[in-house]
Amino acid sequence: MTQGSNIPSVQDPTESGVLIRADGVTLPGTLAMAASAVGLVLFAHGSGSGRHSPRNRLVASELRHEGFATLLLDLLTESEAEDRRYVYDIPLLAERLLAATRWAATQPNTSELPVGFFGASTGGAAALVAAAREPDVRAVVSRGGRPDLADAALADVSAPTLLIVGGEDSQVLELNRRALAALRCHKELAVIPGATHLFEEPGTLEAAARLATKWFLHYLQ
């Protein structure tokens, strides 16, 4: 595994590019630290998205403002991302997320931090499958996610889980309600009024970011 460069302890978060070995490939990521970080949140991006996603970067910025370290990474290589078989390979995405979690546990800046997962779209399912396999994960948040794709793993998730869905994203909302019923951990479903799947409506993404931040502040400190 290739380690990222040293990250200075400053009031404003600073980003550092990192490379993480997983499943025989190298995945690029962006690690950002704040002074006296209270936890680390790893992002599992959805289909057709990656570490440069403006929506997830907005959420990550909100989290860092509250003192969290964040790790945004590409769970697929460029060639894999063009193949729909990989995009919906939830076990593969989950294993890559777990590889990043193991990597973070070896880094001096993040090894002692409690860990949470934030997933969007298919990344929501990957985050839940990974959490079911890693009991040390303290909390999971899914935004506009497909937790239904986690299937039987939902019953094995022990980390408190928040599902955030847009009120106008009717099909995904129904899928999240079914997944909520299958979860046996502490769980909540938060519906953002007026939001569609990508939370593009004014103020809706910010509302989701605030809910996610509140969840992680409660369970990661």
Image (cartoon, rainbow, N blue to C red):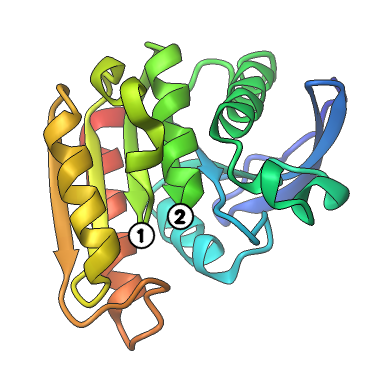
Q: Is residue 38 visible?
A: no
Q: Position of residue 4 (x, y in %)?
A: 81, 33
Labels 1 & 2 near each other (Cβ < 8 A): yes
| Disc 1/disc 2 C-alpha distance (Å) | 5 Å
Question: Amino acid under label 1?
Answer: Gly
Q: Position of residue 30 (x, y in %)?
A: 71, 47
Question: What kind of element bears circle 1?
Answer: loop
Question: Amino acid under label 2?
Answer: Ser
Residue position marked by numbered label 1 in the rendering = 144
Relative to 31, does residue 38 appear above or below in the rendering? above
Q: Position of residue 156 (x, y in %)?
A: 29, 15
- Name the image quarter holding residue 139: top left
Q: Quadrant of the N terminus?
A: top right
Residue position marked by numbered label 2 in the rendering = 121
The answer to which of 125 and 221 lies nearer the viewer is 125
Asked if residue 88 lies left or right of residue 17, the reply is left
The answer to which of 128 and 170 lies nearer the viewer is 170
Asked if residue 18 lies left or right of residue 182, the reply is right
Q: Position of residue 29 (x, y in %)?
A: 74, 43
Answer few, some or many: residues within 10 Å of disc 2's Cα (few below 14, many 20 plus, some between 14 and 19).
many
Q: Is residue 216 visible?
A: yes
Q: Quadrant of the C terminus?
A: top left
Relative to 147, does residue 11 appear above or below in the rendering? below
Q: Tell me what residue is drawn at x 67 percent, y 54 percent.
A: 51
Q: Tell me what residue is drawn at x 40 percent, y 23 percent.
A: 131
Asked if residue 107 lies left or right of residue 116, the reply is right
**Which numbered disc flags the more N-terminal residue, 1 or 2?**
2
Answer few, some or many: residues within 10 Å of disc 1's Cα (few below 14, many 20 plus, some between 14 and 19).
many
Relative to 203, does residue 60 appear above or below in the rendering? above
- Name the image quarter holding residue 62: bottom left
